[in-house]
Every structure is written in C-alpha cells, then in structure tokens.
Image (cartoon, rainbow, N blue to C red):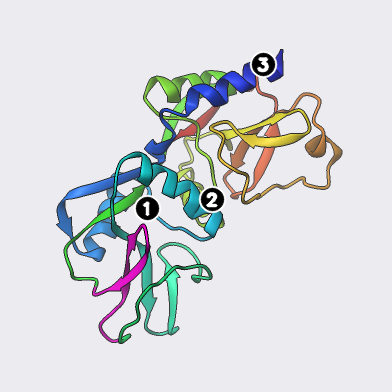
Amino acid sequence: MEKIIFCFLILTSSCCWGEKYVFVDSPQKSWMYAKDYCQQNYANIVSLTSAEEERVFFKYVNKNGPREGWIGIYWDQNMRRWKWWRGGNVTYHRVVNSGEWDTVKNVNWMQNGWQMEVGTSPKSFFCLNMIVVQERKTWEDALEHCRKNDGDLISLLSEVENHISKIKIEDSALTQQVWIGMRYLGDSWMWVNGDPVLYTASLTEGDQDYQCPKLRRCGALTKEGKWENRDCEEKLNFICA
C-alpha cells in the first residue's frame, strides 16, 4: 500500500514543483538589488552548484518559456574567486564569455550558457523560494498543506540550499526538526516531488535504521543542518516551496 500511495504523491506533484524557483521579470534591477530582494521576499538568489542541479532548474525554465536573469554568483575581490552568495566557492559553471575582473563581477543565466556581466546592469533574476510553516503537522499532513498552497515540501539539492534552509529555521519558536520532502520507499530515500537525490546531510548514514528504516521513514532537517529519519506521525513544523 505504501508504494502505491507514494507513487501517487510523486505523480500529483509535477504541476507545482517549480514554485521553488521564482522568476522576477519586472522591474529589471542590478545584481545587488536582486540579491537583497530575494533575501527579503523569498530565501536567497538562486545558486546552481552542479550540472545535475542545473538540469532540475532547466526543467522549470523550459516549462515557462525562454527566460534569463541574474543568479547568485559574485566575484570576491579579496579572495580572487567566484563565490555563491551565502554559499561556498564556485566549482561548477557554464561561463560563455570572459571579462576584466575590475568591471565584470556577476553572472546572467541563459539557456545556452552563463554570461559574465557588470552587476549594475538592469536584468531579471531568479529567487529560491522557501516557506517555513510554524504549524505542527505529521509528514503527510504537512505535504497536503504545502500542496493546497500550490507548493510542495522542500527538496534540498545542494549544500548551499541546505545551508539556506538551516538559516531559515534558526527561530527558537520552531521545533528542533522540521519536515522536508524526503521519504523512504522500497530500498531508498527519495524526494517526494521526484527530484534526484544529489546531496545528503545525514547524521546517521552508518545506522542500520537509516539504511533500512522500519518506522522512521520520513525525512526532517535539524537546526544544525543535518537530516534525520523520523516517525512520519510526529508533529513538526515544515518547509514548503
């Protein structure tokens, strides 16, 4: 029965998973404005730290037509390195042009590559969306709540996304763990929206109960930024996207 139910959850989520990424088209703004706007109104400006993560993002872009805009790369003048905003060093990129570091300090994402640009240029941009819900619910009730609001339980595809979600749940009023969109099915952990598991931050990877859980089959994020498998009937706060 669990397998049937879980397959249904994946199939019914395909219409809304793109809400994790928000495209802000108008008015077009500088990179600095875009970064601040995303932090104040969503969670962060989008980071794409691997080819696999970009492929997930690309599905969203294709679904909504050709789009381009700022993503969260900036040139750290002191370190002389490209970095992700609120993340680490840039190790993956698809830059299609080069420029002088004194003037070109940010990146405009396009479908055919990443264009290095002067950050003061007005452009559209992409934000990462995370909504922390302070109601305490079971995992499945949390999932239902997110979907009633045209979203889904969050999938975390990179260390940067995990770090941003950790920042979002630092409020002492929240439960010590919050539900994320991870569920154990058959013999593996999966994201409920069908996203690939590209990154893990588990406390208990060597634990037999993590490898083959009998009861704790739903995933939660701790305030330390680790993932735990929990009893799905526990009532926790949660993150929608």
Up-down: is 37 above or below 141?
Answer: below
- The local secondary structure at tag 3 comes to helix
Between marks 1 and 3, how big is the CA–CA gap? 35 Å
Q: Residues within 10 Å of mark 1 (few under 14, many from 20)?
A: many
Which of 168/45 is in front? 45
Residue beneath label 2, please? 162
Q: Which residue is mark 3?
A: 4
Residue 129 tag number: none
Q: Position of residue 180 (x, y in %)?
A: 56, 35
Query: Residue 1 lies in magenta, yes or no?
Result: no
For this orientation, the residue located farthest to the right is: 208
- The number of numbered discs placed on residues in the rendered structure image is 3
The residue singled out by tag 1 in the image is: 44
Where residue 98 appears, as percent x and y from the top left, is 35, 81
Q: Kindly identify the residue that appears in the image at 25 percent across and 58 percent down.
A: 34
Extreme residue in the front direction: 112
Can you say which quadrant of the picture contains the C terminus? top left
Task: Indicate the amino acid at tag 3.
Answer: Ile
Q: CA distance from mark 1 to mark 2?
A: 12 Å
Q: Are marks 2 and 3 in contact (CB under 8 Å)?
A: no
User: What residue type is disc 2 on?
Assistant: Asn
